[in-house]
Amino acid sequence: MRLEAIQKKLETVFLPEQAVVLAEVINEAYTDLVKTSDFNELKEIVRNLSLTMEELAQAQIETQKEVSRLNRSLQELAEAQKRTEQRVEELAEAQKRTEQRVEELAEAQKRTEQRVEELAVVQKETQKEISRLDRALQELAEAQKRTEQRVEELAEAQKRTEQRVEELAEAQKRTEQRVEELAEAQKRTEQRVEELANAQKRTEEELRKLINEHAETRRQLGGLAITVGYRLEDEAFKALPKLLKKDYGLVVKGRLKRKFVQDNQGQEIEINILGEGEKEGEVYTIVGESKSQLSKRDVDDFIRRKLKRLEGVFPRMFPVLVTYMISQPGVEEYVQEKGIALYYSYDF
């Protein structure tokens, strides 16, 4: 009965669980004591203990307030960390570590609450925990500061990236416009090429006609040239014996004629003017050719294609060229340099 009374009285000052502990201590002390002076001393001890418990209770209240403040700070930091996570994806890992740290703090807080009954020890450990939490908060604040700085740098980089993307988009737009212009120009070029191809086709058709006409013209001219050449040679057959005798003292034996003979390679070769003549007791083979228009090139061709191929076939050759006219100055002198007799149609 006395224990319950003591307990009720103590509950007016202490927490119920604290009052139970103190009531049991006082009851045990009261049972063991006999003297009134000892009881008075015990009462003084209880009073001092009550004061101490009040101080400890007040300190506990302050501690709980500090812990609540820290909890609110932690909650605010967690919210800030959450907003940071939403802005920067790569900070998710840091947030994860922060949440883990908060869980550790919550677990520490739970252990702290479990040890509240040991008020003196709890107070000391709480102060240590507060110091540790302050350091953790300072570290978190520094980390948050670095995070915000990094976010600001990322935002600036993002801004530059967006500006660069916009520039690239503008350049792409210009490129596409240029490509479109080039495509249009290509289209016009292809159209022009097609027109040119059609014109080329028409030109080739006209050219084919001209070639055919030219071939026909050449055929006709060739026939005419042959006719003219034959006509010139025919006249030469008649006139050359007299001219050669008068100019060179060469007496023609027999008739001049056209004839195929074998060259020094055993191949057949046509000679336009062929015959024999005698001069100062020596026999010469007259080898001649007619050209309607005589050029230096014709002289070289006559030497290469006729005289050179007949070297060794006839012991002595007397070369003769007959023509209507020369095609360039200096041909007569060139013929004389080569040792060839030259006659014009008007000499006949």
Image: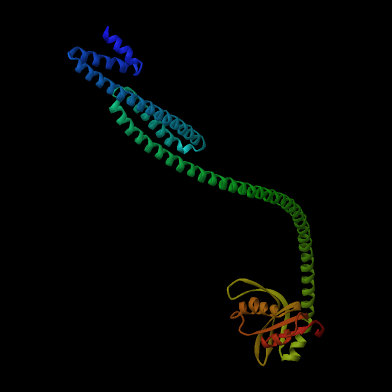
Left or right placement of residue 108 versus residue 81 in this view: left
Quarter of the figure with residue 39? top left
Give the x, y percent position of residue 205: 77, 55
Query: Taking 145 as reference, is 264 above or below it?
Result: below
**Residue 115 appears in view:** no
For residue 60, say whether it is visible. yes
Asked whether, in this view, residue 200 is left or right of residue 80, the answer is right
Toward the viewer: 88 or 303?
88
Residue extending farthest to the top is 1
The residue positioned farthest toward the front in the image shown: 37
Residue farthest right in this picture? 346
At horizontal 52% and vertical 44% (from top left) the residue drawn is 152
Report the front residue among 344 and 211: 211
Rendering coords of residue 324 (x, y %): 79, 80
Q: What colouring does the structure picture have? A: rainbow
**Point 38% across, 31% down: residue:** 100
Quadrant where the image shows the N terminus: top left
Tell me if residue 241 comes above or below residue 56 in the rendering. below
**Residue visible at 52% across and 37% down in the picture:** 87
Quadrant for the C terminus in the image? bottom right
**Residue at far bottom of view:** 280
Count of marks, rendered view: 0
- Residue 156: x and y, percent? 54, 46
| Quarter location, residue 280 | bottom right
Which residue is painted at 82% across and 83% down in the image?
346
Query: x, y (%) of residue 103?
Result: 38, 28
Q: Nearer the viewer, residue 314 or 220?
A: 220
